[in-house]
Image: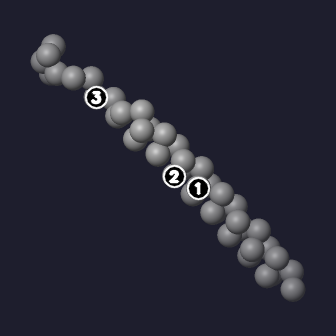
């Protein structure tokens, strides 16, 4: 790696978008678990 190479850090917008997608995926998984539980208890 050369000393003149830019740092390998994604821009702030990309990091924010990744955090949002991670949270959305977590919420979706939680919602699916709750839905399966509700449907299973009927």
Which SS class for mark 1? helix
Q: Earlier in the sequence, mark 3 or mark 2?
A: 3
Q: Which residue is mark 1?
A: 24
Residue 22: x, y in percent?
Answer: 54, 49
Distance (Cα) linking label 3 and label 2 = 21 Å
Residue 6: x, y in percent?
Answer: 21, 23
State if disc 2 and disc 3 touch (CB < 8 Å).
no
Residue shown at 42% from the left, 38% from the top:
13
**Which image quadrant: the C terminus?**
bottom right
Q: Which residue is mark 2?
A: 21
Distance (Cα) linking label 3 and label 1 = 26 Å
Determine whether 14 is above or below 41 in the image: above
Label 3: how many Cα within 10 Å (few below 14, some 14–19, many 20+): few
Res. 30 image quadrant: bottom right
Residue shown at 28% from the left, 28% from the top:
8
**Which image quadrant: the N terminus?**
top left
Determine whether 42 is above or below 8 in the image: below
The disc label shown at residue 14, or none: none
Label 1: how many Cα within 10 Å (few below 14, some 14–19, many 20+): few
Which SS class for mark 3? loop
State if disc 2 and disc 1 touch (CB < 8 Å).
yes
Determine whether 40 is above or below 18 in the image: below
Asked whether, in this view, residue 27 is left or right of residue 2, the answer is right
Distance (Cα) linking label 1 and label 2 = 5 Å
Q: Residue furthest front?
A: 13
Asked whether, in this view, residue 26 is left or right of residue 14, the answer is right
Q: Which residue is mark 3?
A: 8
Determine whether 34 is above or below 9 in the image: below
Residue shown at 76% from the left, 68% from the top:
34
Which SS class for mark 2? helix
């Amino acid at each position: 790696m050369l000393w003149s190479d830019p740092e390998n850090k994604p821009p702030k917008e990309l990091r924010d978008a990744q955090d949002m997608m991670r949270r959305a995926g977590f919420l979706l998984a939680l919602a699916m678990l709750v839905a399966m539980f509700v449907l299973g208890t009927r």
